[in-house]
């Protein structure tokens, strides 16, 4: 079913994108354009990529941007369409727009003021209240009792924790086994997620820079996918090589469609996009 | 059996031995996690609504329910009687099961009666009904604003808000969902 074009939402979306790009430009970030058609999707064992002619449409521009970071550009971002199969609904679209940014000599907590700046600029541009973010660790949200297995962790998260995350929030310090591509410190990963208007808006890391550990994570993820009867994602040698040459860096990916939804109060992602 | 990908509003499922209608569902997937479907389920037997989260791919049984078009005949106290116009079979439903929907019932209105394991347990109104205004404040002629509303009593027994240009005696098209709302005037 075709969703009608919502002219107001498209205007607000354009205003937000303009404000975000201006704020990034002010902050010294350089816009780069990663390829959309790639040899391997990001290292995300629960994401299903869209196949295209024997290759993949990227699920995020992470690997390409890390190669750029390793090549010596210290503050970069891209705003591009990304593709994730088997995701649909009012908060999910198979094709959506991602803002992804990286900057050198920083850790995950340094992402907080940058995101606050961007969201604040976008909010002011559309006349929305500038949000004040609270910070919560995963351990606090689980009341100190983090479930040991992934299935219980995510069911509890979706069923009981996420519905209560209605205030603007940075969620910090995920368990080490949910590190994805973040640095691990003891039992936690240096990883954060940002919530606005009850929506999971983005995910950021202190970026892992150990090529041996990164290869091990690729292999673990592949083994896990095989165990689930899914096709393993190929190992991306480009990002493993880049990880060895990258400066210490923080990076975050933010869903632009959801940012527009959160700032305009729009409950349906289809109305901030032009539907197929 | 239904999988979570079959979920849609109005689907009737069996859960813990009781029949429910799905009244809300949403695909949820944490960025780094597995997928779930969050639902609100209305009990077909009691009318109460519960929330339940399913893992993607989880299966649930189909509720053993059947719907039959029937006509509303009359209410006697708390008992509402409906008739199948082909077989002339009659069934009775308690007012407490019908809840707020009872106020839209008029003689001869075609509804859908729900049978669970062969027993009549509930009914669904048509989404739209036609009914007359029996009382409202005098109409403000010429004001065609849809934004200003006043109360109107309808022949079926319900009270809804209507635009101020509506007069007593006019026939209206009314949406029966979510408590009832004005759709349009019918010129007959």
Image (cartoon, coloured by chain):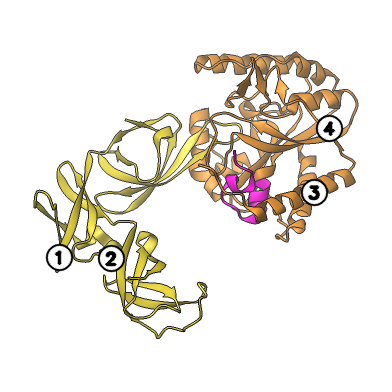
Chain colours: A orange, B yellow
Q: Residue at 59% x, 45% y: name it.
A: A269
> Residue A221 appears at what percent x and percent y?
61, 18
Position of residue A181 relative to residue B155, above or below, is above
Does the CB distance between marks 4 and 2 fall below 8 Å? Answer: no
The x and y percentages for residue B116 are 20, 44
- Using the rendered image, report if marks 4 and 3 lie on a common chain: yes
Image mark 3: chain: A
Q: Are marks 3 and 1 on the same chain?
A: no
Closest to the camera, between mark 4 and mark 2, is 2
Calculate the distance from the C-alpha at mark 4 to the C-alpha at mark 3.
16 Å
Chain of the residue where label 2 is placed in the rendered structure: B
- Find out whether the residues at labels 3 and 1 contact each other: C-beta distance under 8 Å: no
Same subunit: marks 2 and 1:
yes
A61 or A166, which is in the foreground? A61
Nearest to N terminus: mark 2 or mark 1: 1
Task: Give the chain letter at badge 4.
Answer: A
Is residue B153 visible in this depiction of the protein? Answer: yes
Extent of the magenta region: A258-276
Which residue is identified by label 3? Answer: A18
Tell me the chain of label 1.
B
Which element carries disc 1, helix, strand or loop?
strand
Q: Quadrant of the N terminus of chain B?
A: top left
Q: Are marks 1 and 4 in contact (CB under 8 Å)?
A: no
Decide whether residue A267 is among the magenta residues: yes
Look at mark 4 in the image and give the residue it sits on. Answer: A32
4 and 3 marks in contact (CB < 8 Å): no
Going from the N terminus, do you reach mark 4 or mark 3 first?
3
Asked where in the image residue B150 lies, by quadrant, the reply is bottom left
- 3D distance between C-alphas at marks 4 and 2: 61 Å
Q: Give the class, few, some or many, for how many residues have Cα within 10 Å of label 4's Cα (few <14, many ≥20).
A: some
Q: Which residue is mark 2?
A: B104
- Same subunit under labels 1 and 4? no
């Amino acid at each position: 079913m075709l969703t009608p074009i919502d002219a107001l939402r498209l205007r607000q979306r354009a205003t937000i994108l303009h404000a975000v790009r201006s704020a990034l430009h002010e902050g010294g970030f350089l816009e780069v354009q990663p390829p959309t058609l790639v040899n391997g999707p990001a290292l995300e064992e629960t994401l299903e990529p869209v196949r295209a002619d024997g290759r993949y449409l990227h699920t995020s521009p992470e690997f390409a941007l890390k190669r750029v970071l390793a090549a010596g550009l210290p503050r970069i971002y891209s705003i591009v369409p990304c593709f994730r199969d088997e995701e649909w609904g009012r908060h999910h679209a198979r094709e959506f727009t991602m803002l992804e940014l990286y900057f050198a000599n920083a850790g995950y907590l340094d992402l907080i003021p940058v995101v606050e700046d961007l969201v604040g600029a976008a909010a002011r541009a559309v006349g929305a209240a500038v949000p004040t973010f609270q910070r919560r660790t995963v351990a606090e949200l689980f009341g100190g009792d983090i479930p040991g297995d992934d299935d219980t962790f995510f069911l509890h998260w979706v069923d009981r924790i996420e519905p209560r995350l209605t205030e603007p929030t940075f969620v910090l310090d995920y368990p080490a086994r949910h590190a994805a591509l973040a640095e691990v410190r003891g039992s936690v990963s240096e990883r954060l997620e940002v919530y606005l208007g009850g929506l999971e808006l983005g995910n950021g890391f202190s970026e892992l820079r150990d090529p041996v550990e990164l290869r091990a994570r690729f292999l673990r993820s592949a083994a896990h996918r095989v165990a689930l009867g899914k096709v393993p994602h190929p190992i991306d040698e480009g990002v493993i090589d880049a990880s060895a040459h990258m400066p210490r860096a923080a990076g975050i990916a933010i869903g632009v469609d959801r940012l527009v939804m959160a700032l305009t109060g729009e409950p349906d992602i289809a109305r901030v996009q032009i539907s197929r | 059996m239904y999988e979570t990908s079959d979920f849609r509003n109005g689907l009737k499922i069996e859960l813990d031995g009781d029949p429910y209608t799905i009244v809300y569902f949403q695909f949820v997937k944490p960025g780094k996690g597995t997928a779930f479907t969050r639902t609100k389920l209305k009990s077909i037997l009691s009318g109460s609504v519960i929330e339940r989260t399913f893992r993607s791919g989880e299966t649930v049984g189909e509720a053993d329910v059947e719907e039959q078009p029937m006509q509303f005949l009359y209410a006697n106290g708390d008992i509402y009687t409906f008739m199948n116009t082909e077989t002339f079979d009659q069934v009775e439903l308690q007012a407490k099961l019908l809840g707020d929907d009872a106020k839209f019932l008029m003689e001869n209105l075609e509804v859908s009666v729900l049978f669970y394991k062969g027993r009549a347990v509930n009914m669904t109104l048509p989404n739209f009904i036609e009914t007359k205004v029996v009382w409202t404040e005098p109409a403000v002629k010429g004001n065609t604003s849809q934004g200003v509303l006043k109360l109107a009593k309808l022949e079926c027994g319900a009270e809804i808000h209507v635009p101020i240009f509506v007069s007593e005696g006019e026939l209206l098209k009314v949406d029966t969902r979510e408590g009832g709302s004005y759709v349009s005037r019918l010129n007959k």
